[in-house]
């Protein structure tokens, strides 16, 4: 629940610019690690499951040419406070997407995301980062 804003602009030469921003109160959950045995703070059984209230802030900007492609950047910040333990999770996601239109109905997209995660459990802290690259073929119907 929270306010958001979106803008769209298209020029006579088919150039376009889109932007959006959101600030909201969320209820979310996050596993402390994808490792099946070890988490941020040792053995998985000692790690909290981050489930509880929090906040989300998100901004996206996209610039492109209609029927050609676009470049999109994004910034997202999540915060979740666990209701089960004295734990907090902060996640930042930086994104870059390049999209190229192959036809009216198909597109290819190359994307890069950088995840930066900060976690706390009582007086212990964890910081980790992970990049992700993706290549997609998109069929529009």
Image (cartoon, rainbow, N blue to C red):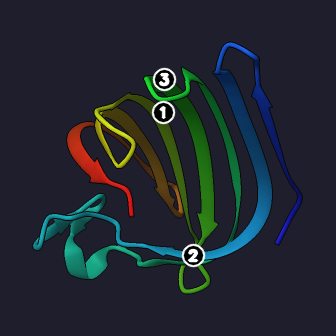
Name the residue at 64% across, 18% down. Answer: 15
Under tag 1, what secondary structure?
Answer: strand
Front disc: 2 or 1: 1
How many angstroms separate mark 2 from mark 1 (CA)? Answer: 20 Å
Which of the pair 25/124 is nearer the observer?
25
Q: Which residue is mark 1?
A: 94
**Residue 55 rendering spot, x and y as whole percentages:** 72, 61
Sequence-earlier tag: 1 or 3: 3
How far across and how far down the image is residue 12, in percent? 75, 17
Q: Position of residue 38 (x, y in %)?
A: 15, 66
Of the numbered discs 2 and 3, the one sitting upstream in the chain is: 2
> Residue 130: x, y in percent?
27, 38
Question: Which numbered circle lies on residue 71?
Answer: 3
Closer to the camera in the image, 115 or 136: 136
Question: Based on the displayed image, in which of its 4 quarters is residue 64 positioned?
Answer: top right
Marked residue nearer the N-terminal end (2 or 1): 2
Name the foreground residue: 18 vs 89. 18
Residue for badge 2: 28
Q: In the rendered view, would you say 48 is above or below 11?
A: below
């Amino acid at each position: 629940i929270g306010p958001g804003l979106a803008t769209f602009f298209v020029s006579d030469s088919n150039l376009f610019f889109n932007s959006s921003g959101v600030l909201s109160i969320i209820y979310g959950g996050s596993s402390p690690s994808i490792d099946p045995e070890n988490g941020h703070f040792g053995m998985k059984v000692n790690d909290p499951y981050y489930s509880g209230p929090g906040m989300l802030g998100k901004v996206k900007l996209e610039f492109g040419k209609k029927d050609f492609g676009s470049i999109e950047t994004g910034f997202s910040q999540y915060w979740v406070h666990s209701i089960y333990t004295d734990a907090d999770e902060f996640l930042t996601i930086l994104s870059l997407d390049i999209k190229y239109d192959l036809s009216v109905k198909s597109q290819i997209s190359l994307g890069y995301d950088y995840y930066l995660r900060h976690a706390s459990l009582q007086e212990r802290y964890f910081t980790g980062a992970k990049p992700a690259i993706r290549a997609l073929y998109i069929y529009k119907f």
